[in-house]
Image (cartoon, rainbow, N blue to C red):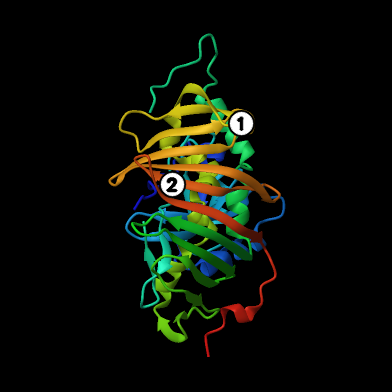
Amino acid sequence: MYRFLPVLLLLLSGRALAEDLLIESEPFIARSDAVALHSQVSDALPEGSTATVRLVRRFHQGQGWRYLVVIEGASSQAEADTLAALGAGLEVHQSEGSVQPAPEAEAQHVAAPDTVGAAADGEPVAVTEPQPSAPSGERMLAAEGVLRAAVRAHGGREGAGVLVAEAESIRFSYTRTVPEATEPLVVNNHFLRKGGALRLEVEITSGAAVNSTTILTTDQVGWVTVEGEHTERDSDRTLEILERFSPEAVLAVPLGFPDDVETAGVWRELETVDRRGEGEEDLWILQGLEGSSLQEAAFGVQQRLLRQVTWSSSQGDITFSYDDYQLVEKDLLVPFHTRIERDGEMIEEITVLTFEVDPVIADDQFAAPE
């Protein structure tokens, strides 16, 4: 399993610049709790305030996915203290490097190839270089410039990831293909979210697994249905499982990229080492320092989109390759095809079928089975 690096936040000092001020809530297990606080704070912002309120999804080592409310843009320490008083659990911090350009950083989104099918009991189960050189006579674009352009191409910090996190409802379907010894496991996953309610339909088209439907109802009760048998499940465990199928998990790297570049130290260690031809578009190749968890990232020279990223892990070098970027909504440009390799061998392939933000979804989709 690949983990996010924890975010490093320094407590506010008296000498901090106003632009360094960051207000964060405590982490919430349930997205609905974070949404409620987000609405409360947004409604209570003083008239004329320059602050912005965001809903953030972050991985906490040893705890799993959590939701936070983040307030940025306070004009002074006094305003920051006032904003922090708007909701319980809000605290003022100083964000290291928050006033620096895009490549200044301290956290990382890495999605693991995770649950794709269902076991017999109905609970979804886990599945899990050439030496660079600069072309003769060509000037390398500095990593800072490549990253700034890529952040803009991915919609900026208020772009894709924020749009998905703050959406009232999501419809997300995709096919996962996992190589197996006899025949590949091919699964269509249909994920729905409306407020704090979730629904997942797992449809097996090839391989040894069974279809299932998992629901977290509006009142946070978990249910799993397999072959007509309904079983009530622990709500926290159901939430944890279902979130693995969300777009924020499946597309964590491209959706979280703009925010990660602003807050993740591994990105500031990158250096442009090559310009390489790849298909229809040349790529800028950026490499990390020796021993860094982020080994290499590749960005399109023309479109500036993230095309490939390689992370080191205890399981080997994991490479995510992205193509077929499509505009789902304004500022929501996402890859509809992802290939995941471990040490050069494909371990999973993901093809997005449907991605809708704020669609109309009937409440009965999240009702407990009869």
Give the residue pinned by disc 1.
280
Task: Out of 348 and 149, give the one closest to the viewer.
Answer: 348
At mark 1, the secondary structure is loop
User: Can residue 100 be seen at all in this image of the molecule?
Assistant: no
Looking at the image, the residue that sits furthest to the left is 314
Residue 98 lies, with reference to residue 274, above or below; the image says below
Callout 1 environment at 10 Å: few (<14), some (14 to 19), or many (20+)? few
Nearest the viewer among 58 and 344 is 344
Residue 130 appearing in the image: yes
Q: Quadrant of residue 179?
A: bottom left
- Left of 118 or right of it: where is 337? right
Q: Residue at x 42, y 36 (%)?
A: 265
Can you identify the residue that label 2 sits on?
340
- Residue lying at the far bottom of the rendered structure: 370
- The three-letter amino acid code for the residue at tag 2 is Ile
Per the image, label 2 sits on a secondary structure element best described as strand
- Kindly report the distance in space between the C-alpha atoms of the residues bearing marks 1 and 2: 21 Å
Q: Nearer the viewer, mark 1 or mark 2?
A: 1
Could you tell me which residue is drawn at 53 percent across and 36 percent down? Answer: 17
Q: Disc 1 vs disc 2: Cβ atoms closer than 8 Å?
A: no
Depth check: give the residue in front, 197 or 364.
364
